[in-house]
Amino acid sequence: MASHLITVEREQGEIVCGRCRLADRPWTRLRGLLGRRRLNPNEGLLLRPVGAIHTLFMLFAIDVVFLDRDYAVVKVVEGLRPWRFAAARRAKAVLELPPGGARRLRVGQQLVIVPNWHAEKKAA
């Protein structure tokens, strides 16, 4: 089953990731970003439920944002290189962004997940 497209915004409406894939099933979480050569600006992957990730077999670095059950930022890891692990206590979801994508995010900021029905219709 394909992952769904969503938009991730700050509470104030500023877009953090406009074309984000939702990986909320075992297969989509397992596959993650494997096989990709890069993430384009404004692309990302939201994995849930998950509190830890790895970049084994990946070909590029990513920014990682750990979120609690209410999508508040609990940890930000910038530039996580291939063959590394990262985790955060209390994390229930992980937002993977291209390098520099998490630059303006800070612990405690609230994010909002918005279904992106328009983009899903275009992709189908």
Image: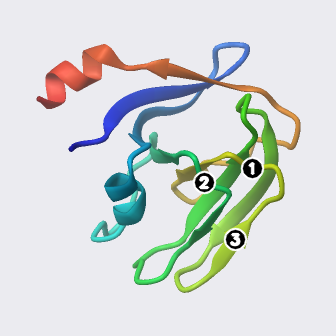
Which residue is at the far left? 124
Q: Closer to the observer: label 1 or label 3?
A: 1
Q: Give how far apart the Cα atoms at labels 2 and 3 are.
A: 11 Å
Residue at 72% across, 17% down? 11
- C-beta proximity under 8 Å, tags 2 and 3: no
Q: Is residue 31 above or below residue 82?
A: above
Give coordinates of residue 119: x percent, y percent: 27, 23
User: What residue does disc 2 label?
Assistant: 50
Give coordinates of residue 3: x percent, y percent: 30, 41
Give coordinates of residue 115: x percent, y percent: 42, 19
Mark 1 element type: loop
Q: Give how far apart the Cα atoms at labels 2 and 1 are.
A: 7 Å
Q: Quadrant of the N terminus?
A: top left
User: What residue does disc 3 label?
Assistant: 86
How crowded pointer 2 is (Cα within 10 Å; few <14, some 14-19, many 20+) is rated as some
Give coordinates of residue 62: x percent, y percent: 55, 64
Q: Earlier in the sequence, mark 2 or mark 1?
A: 2
Which residue is at the far front? 26
Q: Earlier in the sequence, mark 2 or mark 3?
A: 2
Judge by depth and name the residue closer to the eye, 79 or 72. 72
Q: Earlier in the sequence, mark 1 or mark 3?
A: 3
Which amino acid is tagged 2? Val
Q: Is residue 8 above or below residue 61?
A: above
Which amino acid is tagged 3? Ala
How crowded pointer 3 is (Cα within 10 Å; few <14, some 14-19, many 20+) is rated as some
Q: Give how far apart the Cα atoms at labels 1 and 3 are.
A: 11 Å
Mark 3 element type: strand
Q: Closer to the observer: label 2 or label 3?
A: 2
User: What residue does disc 1 label?
Assistant: 91
Residue at 47% across, 26% down? 7
- Residue 43, quarter of the rendered image: top left
